C-alpha cells in the first residue's frame, strides 16, 4: 500500500492542487471580468472624453474665429477712428485758418474804421472851423449890410428932406 497510498496521496495532492488552481483561476476569472468591466467603463469614459475634447476643440475653433472677427472689427474701428481724428484735425486746421483770416479782416476793418473815425473827426473839426468862419463872415455881412442900409436910409432922408 505504500505504492497505493503514495499514489493516493499524490492524487489527493494533485486534486487539492487542481482545486486550488481551479479556485485561483475562478478568482482570476472574476478579477478578469471585473478588469474587463473596468476597461469597458474606462473605454466609455475615454470615448466621452474624446467627444468632450472634440466639442471643446470646436468651441475653441469658434472662439478663435470670434477673436479673429473681433480683431478685424477692432482694426476697422481703429482705422475709422484714425480717419475721424484726421478729418477733425483737417477741420480744425481749416477753422484755425478761417479764424486767422477773419481776425486779419477784422483787424483791417478796425484799422479802416479808426482811420475813418480820424478823418471824420478831422472833417468835423474843419466843419466847425468853417462854421465859425461862416458865422463870423455872416455877422460881418449883416453888420455891413445894416450899416449900408442905415447909410441908404440917411441918404434917402437927406434926399427927402
Image (spheres, helix red, strand yellow):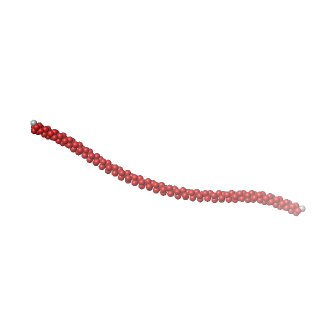
The one of 113 and 158 positioned closer to us in this rendering: 158
- x%, y% of residue 61? 59, 59
Please tell me in which quadrant of the rendered image residue 7 appears: bottom right
* Furthest-front residue in this view: 160
Q: On the picture, is 81 further left or further right than 28? A: left
- x%, y% of residue 44? 70, 58
Q: In which quarter of the image is the N terminus?
A: bottom right
- x%, y% of residue 156? 12, 38
Q: Quadrant of the C terminus?
A: top left
The one of 155 and 98 positioned closer to us in this rendering: 155
For image coordinates 48% across by 57% down, the residue present is 79
Q: On the picture, is 157 further left or further right than 74? A: left
Q: Is residue 128 above or below residue 47?
A: above
Please tell me in which quadrant of the rendered image residue 132 appears: top left
The one of 94 and 116 positioned closer to us in this rendering: 116
For image coordinates 65% across by 57% down, the residue present is 52
Q: Is residue 160 above or below residue 23?
A: above
* Furthest-right residue in this view: 1
Q: On the picture, is 15 further left or further right than 38? A: right
Q: How many marks overall?
A: 0
Q: Is any atom of residue 151 visible in this view?
A: no
* Furthest-top residue in this view: 161
The one of 12 and 54 positioned closer to us in this rendering: 54
Q: In this view, does 120 lie above or below 29?
A: above
Q: Is any atom of residue 130 visible in this view?
A: yes
- x%, y% of residue 138? 19, 41
For image coordinates 46% across by 56% down, the residue present is 83
Amino acid at each position: 500500500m505504500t505504492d497505493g497510498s503514495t499514489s493516493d496521496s499524490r492524487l489527493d495532492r494533485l486534486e487539492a492542487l487542481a482545486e486550488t488552481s481551479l479556485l485561483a483561476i475562478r478568482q482570476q476569472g472574476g478579477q478578469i471580468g471585473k478588469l474587463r468591466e473596468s476597461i469597458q467603463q474606462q473605454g466609455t469614459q475615454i470615448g466621452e472624453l474624446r467627444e468632450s475634447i472634440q466639442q471643446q476643440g470646436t468651441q475653441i475653433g469658434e472662439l478663435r474665429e470670434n477673436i479673429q472677427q473681433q480683431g478685424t472689427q477692432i482694426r476697422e474701428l481703429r482705422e475709422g477712428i484714425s480717419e475721424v481724428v484726421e478729418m477733425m484735425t483737417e477741420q480744425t486746421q481749416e477753422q484755425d485758418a478761417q479764424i486767422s483770416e477773419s481776425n486779419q479782416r477784422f483787424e483791417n476793418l478796425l484799422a479802416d474804421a479808426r482811420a475813418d473815425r480820424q478823418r471824420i473827426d478831422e472833417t468835423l473839426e474843419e466843419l466847425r472851423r468853417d462854421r465859425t468862419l461862416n458865422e463870423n463872415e455872416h455877422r460881418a455881412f449883416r453888420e455891413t449890410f445894416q450899416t449900408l442900409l442905415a447909410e441908404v436910409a440917411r441918404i434917402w432922408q437927406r434926399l427927402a428932406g
